[in-house]
Image (cartoon, rainbow, N blue to C red):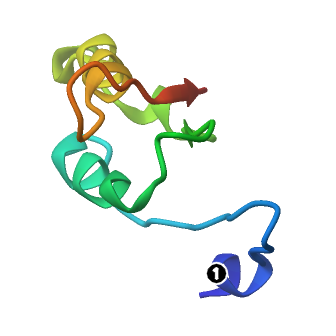
Amino acid sequence: MHAQALLKSTPQGATSYLQADLRDPGVILRWAEVLDFGQPAAVTLLGVLHLIQDSEEPRGIVARLMKGGPEPGVRCGVIV
């Protein structure tokens, strides 16, 4: 994918891309297991949250992502 080709990681920081359905945050959280939560981490939702219908509970999706790190007490920063 073009997005993946544009992402370059360095020893100072890593960048990655995941194509997934936001309505299934479990996929995103399983992928997040590769993150080093000893370092700052973020999940960015760019140009997508407005596509989630109110009936699909967008606030609940974001809340699940915010508290859904792979370790208890670990939180992801979500940028929308």
Could you tell me residue 68's position as x and y percent?
26, 30
The answer to which of 70 and 26 lies nearer the viewer is 70
Could you tell me residue 50's position as x and y percent?
49, 27
- Would you place residue 60 above or below residue 8 in this image? above
Q: Is residue 49 left or right of residue 7?
A: left
The kind of residue tagged 1 is Gln
Could you tell me residue 12's position as x and y percent?
82, 62
Q: Is residue 55 left or right of residue 22?
A: left
Could you tell me residue 75's position as x and y percent?
39, 24
- Would you place residue 53 above or below residue 2 in this image? above
Q: How many marks?
A: 1
- Would you place residue 11 above or below residue 34 in this image? below
Q: Which residue is mark 1?
A: 4
Q: Is residue 45 left or right of residue 30?
A: right
Quarter occupied by residue 3: bottom right
Q: Residue furthest front?
A: 38
The residue at 58%/40% (across/down) is 41
Quadrant in the picture for the N terminus: bottom right
The residue at 53%/27% (across/down) is 78
The residue at 31%/60% (across/down) is 31
The residue at 22%/16% (across/down) is 57
Quadrant in the picture for the C terminus: top right
Secondary element at image label 1: helix
Answer few, some or many: residues within 10 Å of disc 1's Cα (few below 14, many 20 plus, some between 14 and 19). Answer: few
- Would you place residue 70 above or below residue 19 in this image? above
